[in-house]
Amino acid sequence: MRKRKPLLLKAVYPGTFDPITNGHIDIIDRGSSIFDEIIVAILRNPEKQPLFSIEERIQMIEKAIAGFPNVRIETFDGLLVDYAEKIGAKVIVRGLRAISDFEYELQMAMMNRRIKSNLETVFMMPCESYSYLSSKLVREVAELGGKLTGLVPAEVEKRLQERFRSKKRC
Ligand code: PNS
């Protein structure tokens, strides 16, 4: 019998990451111990008005993933499934925080499967202490001057404070 090459399982973890939170990092951590490689893929979406530019988000994510040798960052536009196929990813990783996430995530997973049936979506649950955490809430709390320690990396908290300080001055 011919020896089979071990399958290298590459996963894509797509999102907006505006900004990355400790919940995202928790998913990256869990995923990096299962998959051979994870590509954190930021959607370049001209329709959304993000708080941080793509370059700023890349810088923050690069710092956050520095300790994970099998994780790297890229950006994409167009259909996620096309991008996943282009880079040879077999799996799409998405975080599921609560049942409220499920409907939207299921719709996306089913649509993605309909377009490309050989791609699997794998849902991963972050640590329960991050189950209420979202980039949107993080932006809102930061804008209103609340503390985010322990919910986002220190670098992200610093950038949020700077961003809203400079916005107030305008
Ligand atoms: O962090 P988000 O905003 O929940 O991520 C959503 C994202 C980027 C995963 C989703 O909007 C996406 O995959 N967009 C790419 C365009 C696409 O493939 N749309 C069809 C999805 S069914």
Image (cartoon, rainbow, N blue to C red):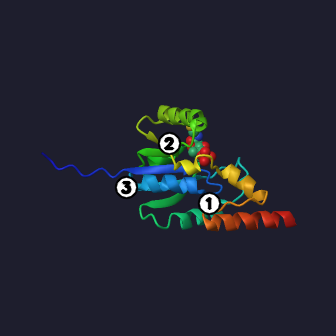
Q: How many marks?
A: 3
Mark 1 CB lies closer than 8 A to ligand 1 = no
From the viewer's side, name the closer residue of 44 and 131. 131
Relative image position of residue 12 (x, y in whole percent): 48, 50
Mark 2 or mark 3, which is nearer to you?
3
Residue topped by disc 3: 36
Q: Residues within 10 Å of mark 3 (few under 14, many from 20)?
A: some
Q: Residues within 10 Å of mark 1 (few under 14, many from 20)?
A: many
Q: Residues within 10 Å of mark 2 (few under 14, many from 20)?
A: many
Residue 150 occupies quadrant:
bottom right
Question: Residue 125's mark?
Answer: none
Whether the residues at callouts 3 and 1 have beta carbons within 8 Å, the answer is: no
Residue topped by disc 2: 81
Mark 3 or mark 1, which is nearer to you?
1
Mark 2 or mark 1, which is nearer to you?
1
Relative image position of residue 113 (x, y in whole percent): 47, 34
The N terminus - image quarter: top left
Whole-angstrom CA distance, mark 2 to mark 1, is 29 Å
| Dot 3 amino acid type | Asp
| Dot 1 amino acid type | Val
Placement of 157 over or under 13, stated as above or below: below
Whether the residues at callouts 2 and 1 have beta carbons within 8 Å, the answer is: no
